[in-house]
Image (cartoon, grey):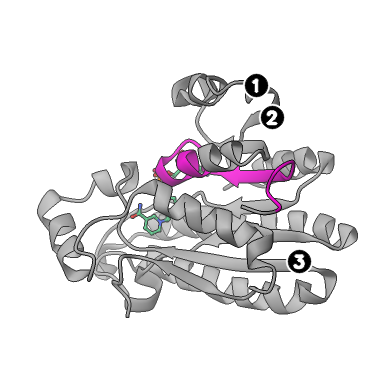
Amino acid sequence: MRGISGKRVVITGAAGGIGRATAKRFLDEGARLLLCDVRPLPDTGLDRELHAESGAGARVRYLQADIATQAGVDALAAAMDEGVDVLINNAGITRDASFGKLSDEQWDQVVAVNLTAVFRLSQAAGLRMKANKRGVILNAASVVAHNGNFGQSNYVATKAGVIGLTKTLARELGRSGVRVNAVAPGFIETPMTAAVPATVLAGMAEKAPLARLGKPEEIAAAYCFLASDDASFITGAVLNVDGGLVV
Ligand SMILES: NC(=O)c1ccc[n+]([C@@H]2O[C@H](COP(=O)([O-])OP(=O)(O)OC[C@H]3O[C@@H](n4cnc5c(N)ncnc54)[C@H](O)[C@@H]3O)[C@@H](O)[C@H]2O)c1
């Protein structure tokens, strides 16, 4: 993709299914990566995986940080002082329960990671990008933000919030040369969906015109396109990558 090589790309939730595939894709495209996850590096296997690629090690930095906390956000923001061209707010969690049983704790945890951290990190990166008069912020939404989903009122509210935040930041940062977009994945084969019963997942796959689950690499490709110069006139968009689930 045009304009990715040499760029400094920050990815949160980099040890998960989509984050890991996204890290690999950007590494293959020649980017320099600042990867963040709450998990300690040795537990993720990311060092072995990414350093295996020839000469890639020097282009990858890992920061263990909990972005649900202000301290975690501050640590990642400080690391961005070395430069940030692309921020991918990918980290996300689920704490599912039907609406009547949903606890404040489940609500707060999901809001902290999926929405508040996106706001705080976008602010940290956005101000740095504004000063440079260029940059790209990409946010993880979800197909459920359009449709709702049983048992996920907390999660859906954050993903709908991410879409609103994306569109507003696109308006506020556009004049400074900063593009802001969201990707709304359908149901993707990752550790997150591994917790969903197989019959439910099969039903979800069946509903999509392409009649299958997505692969993390297919979301990584969307992030890569939106970060590239090939998407230079795209901002404020929500790209559905869902096998046609929302048509
Ligand atoms: N898998 C899907 O079907 C699907 C569908 C729609 C949207 N999404 C979204 O895509 C993103 C990635 O999903 P995934 O399926 O790869 O999930 P995943 O569970 O495989 O990975 C998420 C990663 O985020 C990290 N993380 C969680 N809390 C964190 C915190 N406080 N600080 C730092 N890192 C933290 C986890 O350790 C994990 O490595 C999420 O935002 C998710 O909501 C996924």
Classify 10 Å Cα crowding around label 2: few (below 14), some (14-19), many (20 and above).
Answer: some
In the picture, the disc for residue 240 is none
Write the residue at 65% across / 57% down: 228
- Secondary structure of the residue carrying tag 2 is helix
Indicate whether 18 appears above or below 176: above
- Amino acid at dot 3: Val
As shown in the figure, which amino acid type bears the numbered disc 2?
Answer: Arg
Q: Mark 3 — residue?
A: 178
Q: Is residue 10 magenta?
A: yes
Q: In the figure, is residue 186 to the left or right of 168?
A: left
Span colored in magenta: 3-22
Q: CA distance from mark 2 to mark 1?
A: 8 Å
Q: For residue 111: magenta?
A: no
Q: Nearer the viewer, residue 218 or 189?
A: 218
Mark 3 element type: strand
Picture coordinates of residue 10, whole percent (x, y): 66, 45
Residue 193 in the image: state x and y as whole percent: 28, 49
Of circles 2 and 1, the one toward us is: 1
Say whether marks 2 and 1 touch (CB < 8 Å): yes
User: Which mark is on residue 59?
Assistant: 2
Mark 1 Cα within 10 Å, few/some/many (few <14, many 20+)? few
Q: Quadrant of the C terminus?
A: bottom left
Q: Amino acid at mark 1?
A: Gly
Residue where numbered disc 1 is placed: 55
How far apart in space, not on screen, are marks 1 and 3 (Cα)?
30 Å
Q: Residue at x 69, y 41 (%)?
A: 71
Q: Mark 1: which secondary structure?
A: loop
Image location of residue 3, percent across then percent down:
71, 52
Q: Closer to the camera, 30 or 239?
A: 30
Mark 3 to mark 2 CA distance (whole Å): 24 Å
- The nearer-to-camera label among 1 and 3 is 1
Residue 57: x, y in percent?
64, 22
